[in-house]
């Protein structure tokens, strides 16, 4: 790791306080001049490193450099394999490419922005700067239920955001997280099966959080529907801290997935249970969302009393023109 990389990590670990040039030099085993050169290089990359007279260097509040070394400051050691990009087509695509090459369980791809972010049902996912875009490679033992994994990922993000930001998010089945009535996070779970075994060899859980994204960064048609956790910025924690928190929560939940205890929290955070929803089937129909079952399927009841457990697809909480009346 370069001196510059090691210094980012040290400064992130000391965030909120300062670190003297002498301390940094001793920790890194280099001269103070080499530390100063690394500080200059970090400034040139856009990280605001303040010099505080008589006490040392510190990262200015609200400033960050999202890189592998910064992530390492927040991840348990040894850190999982990481790939970090200023810009990538899609972290899910990158993670799938990596999984095919053999990326182990827990490997994480992180990006500051995506040029071809992927959403569910073949849609695109708007991924402007200010957001956090990450994908984690999971290697399930036995059959992996993608709906349960997506539900676990939703709870993982809610827990990480609650812990770091003190903000409680709502979940719109199955993969959307809401804040103040608008979407602030989307989750896309994809998988790859072995040609010979036909079994799921890997899953990629992709998570896009609108973290400190200014409203104007979204396309105009999305602005009434989406929000971000800190639209006015700056956020209280760097994105590296949030990425690490999500990663930790996700791996913990995935390890205990068969216990399904997290489903209680999923239900508690649901913003659809007990509400009239439109099921976006062909043709769309209205129904009451009555339950989330043990497979994380959404059970809906039509006006004539028939119930259906939805395993995929989409629902809308807003009335949709043309949706048949309950029945
Ligand atoms: C949706 O809302 O339909 C799901 C959106 C999932 C977006 C995330 S951003 C990180 C990862 N990379 C992608 O291309 N998509 C997911």
Image (tube, rainbow, N blue to C red):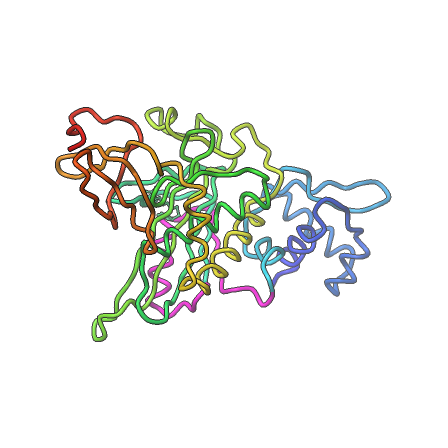
Picture quarter with the C terminus: top left
Residue drawn 37% across and 56% down? Answer: 149
Q: Position of residue 74 (x, y in %)?
A: 61, 55
- Which image quadrant for residue 7? bottom right
Q: Position of residue 126 (x, y in %)?
A: 36, 37
In front of the other: 33 or 275: 275
Q: Position of residue 65 (x, y in %)?
A: 58, 46
Left or right of 16? Residue 205 is: left
Answer above or below: position of 212 versus 291: above
Left or right of 145? Residue 106 is: right
In magenta, the rendered stretch is: 77-106
Answer above or below: position of 115 versus 32: above
Q: Residue furthest bottom?
A: 196
Answer above or below: position of 263 versus 235: below
Q: Residue furthest right?
A: 54
Residue drawn 18% across and 42% down? Answer: 306
Residue drawn 44% across and 50% down? Answer: 264
In front of the other: 104 or 296: 296
In front of the other: 285 or 99: 285
Left or right of 2? Residue 297 is: left
Q: Is-magenta flag for residue 57?
A: no
Picture quarter with the N terminus: bottom right
In front of the other: 262 or 76: 262
Count of numbered labels shown in the rendering: 0
Residue drawn 79% across and 52% down? Answer: 21
Q: Residue furthest left?
A: 283
Q: Position of residue 143 (x, y in %)?
A: 30, 67
Q: Is-magenta flag for residue 104?
A: yes
- Which image quadrant for residue 176? top left
């Amino acid at each position: 790791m370069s001196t510059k990389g090691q210094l980012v990590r040290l400064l992130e670990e000391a965030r909120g306080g300062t670190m003297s040039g002498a301390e940094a030099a001793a920790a890194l085993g280099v001269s103070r001049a080499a530390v100063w050169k690394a500080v200059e290089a970090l400034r040139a990359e856009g990280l605001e490193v303040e010099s505080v007279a008589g006490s040392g260097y510190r990262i200015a509040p609200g400033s960050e450099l999202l890189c592998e070394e910064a992530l390492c400051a927040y991840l348990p050691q040894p850190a999982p394999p990481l790939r970090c990009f200023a810009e990538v087509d899609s972290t899910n695509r990158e993670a799938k490419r990596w999984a095919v090459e053999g990326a182990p369980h827990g490997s994480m791809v992180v990006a500051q922005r995506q040029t071809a972010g992927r959403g569910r049902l073949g849609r695109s996912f708007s991924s402007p700067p200010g957001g956090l875009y990450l994908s984690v490679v999971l290697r399930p033992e036995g059959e992996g239920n993608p709906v349960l994994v997506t539900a676990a990922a939703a709870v993982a993000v809610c827990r990480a955001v609650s812990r770091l930001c003190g903000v409680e998010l709502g979940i719109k089945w199955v993969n959307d997280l809401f804040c103040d009535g608008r979407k602030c996070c989307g989750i896309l779970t994809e998988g790859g099966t072995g040609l010979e075994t036909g079994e799921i060899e890997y899953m990629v859980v992709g998570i896009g959080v609108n973290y400190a994204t200014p409203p104007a960064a979204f396309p105009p048609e999305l602005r009434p529907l989406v929000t971000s956790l800190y639209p006015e910025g700056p956020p209280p924690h760097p994105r590296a801290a949030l990425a690490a928190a999500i990663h930790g929560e996700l791996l913990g939940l995935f390890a205990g997935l068969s216990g399904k205890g997290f489903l209680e929290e999923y239900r508690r955070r649901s913003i659809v249970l007990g509400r009239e929803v439109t099921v976006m089937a062909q043709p769309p129909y209205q129904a009451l969302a009555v339950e989330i079952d043990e497979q994380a399927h959404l059970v809906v009841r039509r006006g004539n009393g028939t119930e259906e457990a939805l395993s995929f697809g989409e629902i809308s909480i807003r009335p949709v023109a043309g949706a048949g009346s309950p029945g």
